Amino acid sequence: MYELPLITADNFITYVLNGLSRGMIIFLVASGLSLIFGLIGLINFAHGAMLALGGYGTYVVLQVTGNFWLGLVISVVLVTLLGLALERKVLYWIYDEPLLGFLSTFGIGLVIEEALAVYFGSRSYTVQSPLPESIQLFGVSYPSYRIFVIAVGAAVALAIGLLLTRTRLGLEIHATANMQPTAEILGVDTSKVYTVTFVLGTALAALAGALTAPITSMYPTIGLDYITMAFLVIIVGGMGSFKGSFVVSMIVGQVIAFGWLLLAPTYVRILIFAAAMVFILYKPRGFFGKPEVHE
């Protein structure tokens, strides 16, 4: 007879922290995806491939230099530059064609995944934690690196929140997303806003990939796993809602952490998606989605 795992105060805290660290990774992916979709209206299926490149790039630089932190910085910078090139040379010209944009990003994602599979093979790669020691937190011993991931995710969330609400760029992003013709009349360079937003979203995906490398194995299609969860997050949280992406990412992280106590990871994902579909039936715009305004 199957017995439920015993949850003590100590391992309860551990599972909560595991959920937070996983939730922060999901949030980094979802927030970048949400920014791009909320402003540009582009369903960027290459977003997951950027995460994979961030992880593999960190692995490669680590193998060459032995320095994880250098690998993180270099991989994020290079993937961000790749995102800039794709936006300027390919996507910029097809923003008014949603179907073509979808097909283009889908194709770009497939090419990147296949290139990774050809070069690295299908086997998984692991990255040694740059912070192997543990620290005492809330009375339990917990890996320092996972605490670092939680801290980075929280810092990024705060920084993006301030960027969107307290800076001129944030005002321009909101203006471009909600009333682009008026924004252009007022002198906003909407083309520049599009580029900055896409590049920022790409950087967040690359950062997520680099940060997750020491936590989970890297494989060519890892981005697909994360992007499907990210799409769920932005739909349930509310399309284009930064706050919704953060809240739902934290919830999903906890569900995964505690769900794995009882079920295999695949079944946990199935339950998450099933619950999300039921939720969307009753609240199609998600938790923080804006109501449609009829003129």
Image (cartoon, rainbow, N blue to C red):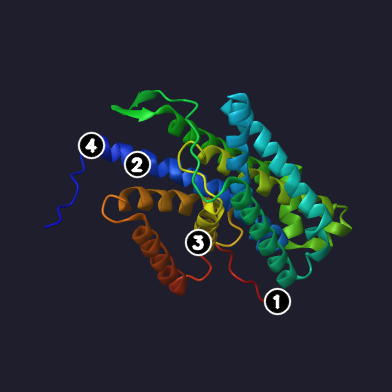
Whether residue 171 is visible here, answered yes or no, is no
Q: Residue drawn 63% across and 56% down?
A: 114
Mark 2, residues whose alpha carbon is within 10 Å: few (<14), some, or many (≥20)? some
Graded by Cα atoms within 10 Å as few (under 14), some (14 to 19) or many (20 or more), the crowding at tag 3 reads many
For disc 1, the marked residue is 295
Mark 1: few/some/many CA within 10 Å (<14, 14-19, 20+): few
What is the secondary structure assignment of the residue under circle 3? Answer: helix
**Mark 1 near mark 4, Cβ–Cβ under 8 Å?**
no
Look at the numbered disc 4 and give the secondary structure of its residue. Answer: helix
Q: Residue at x 63, y 47 (%)?
A: 119
Which mark sits nearer the N-terminus, 3 or 4?
4
How far, Cα to Cα, is label 1 from label 4? Answer: 54 Å
Q: CA distance from mark 1 to mark 3?
A: 30 Å
- Please give the residue where the numbered disc 4 appears in the rendered image: 9
Mark on residue 232? 3
In percent of the image, x 82 and y 53: which residue is there?
88
State if disc 2 and disc 1 touch (CB < 8 Å).
no
The three-letter code of the residue at mark 2 reads: Val
Mark 1 or mark 4: which is in front?
Answer: 4
Q: Amino acid at mark 3?
A: Leu
Ranked by sequence position, the earlier of labels 1 and 2 is 2
Mark 2 to mark 4 CA distance (whole Å): 11 Å
- Separation of residues labelled 1 and 2 (CA atoms): 45 Å
Q: Nearer the viewer, mark 1 or mark 2?
A: 2
Which residue in the protein does label 2 denote?
16
x and y percent of residue 12 in the render? 27, 40
Q: Which of 104/136 is in front?
A: 104
Say what amino acid the circle numbered 4 marks: Ala
Look at 70% across and 37% down and name the residue there.
77
